[in-house]
Image (cartoon, grey):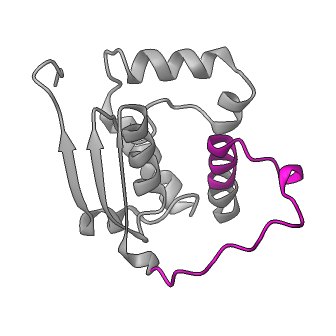
Amino acid sequence: MIATKYLFGLILVLAATGFAPSAAQADDPPLGAYNADISESSISGISSGAFMAVQFATAWSDIVKGVGIIAGGPYCCAQATAVGGLTGDIGTILTTTRRCMVGPPPALEPLGKQTDDWARTEDIDDTRHIAGQKIYVFGGYNDAG
């Protein structure tokens, strides 16, 4: 449940940074503390980064104050798992690149239901937090719908 959400986040961060635990060196200096207020967090992205911003802002909606989305798509659009993507599952890759990025887009009602189900099982944060976020969505004249 909750552990799944945090494991998923860890996998995404490790995959995005190319970091492997064995790559850490004992002589690296520790990171400094900046006293950042986590409740003042925002996230934004363009294209695939916008898709990721939507995923993060929805899954961790209790800490995200705002989100900027430029040429992105809805939460859970790929309808796949991180494990499938990381293991090279071709179905996951084709679903993501076709349905979400080329179209036609999937129906939003099942995506909303899946999101609410995950919130109920605490795999993601309660979706009521999204109502308090400042959200900027930018679309171009060639964007359908």
Q: Which residue does the image show at 41% across and 19% down from the upper left?
A: 99
Residue 34 vs residue 11: left or right? left
Q: Inspect the magenta stretch and tell me whether residue 23 lies in it.
A: yes
Give the quadrant of residue 64: bottom left
Give the magenta range.
9-36
Q: Is residue 124 left or right of residue 57?
A: right
Tell me the quarter of the image containing the N terminus.
bottom right
The percent position of residue 102, horizontal first and vertical second, equals 35, 15
Q: Is residue 105 left or right of residue 91?
A: left
Rendered residue at 34%/68% (across/down)? 129
Q: Quadrant of residue 40?
A: bottom left
Above or below residue 140? Residue 50 is: below
Q: Whole-percent x and y of residue 54?
A: 38, 47
Q: Residue 15 location, x and y as percent?
A: 67, 41
Q: Residue furthest left?
A: 141
Question: Residue 107, relative to residue 58: is it above or below?
Answer: above
Instruction: Give whichever of 119, 44 is nearer the camera.
Output: 44
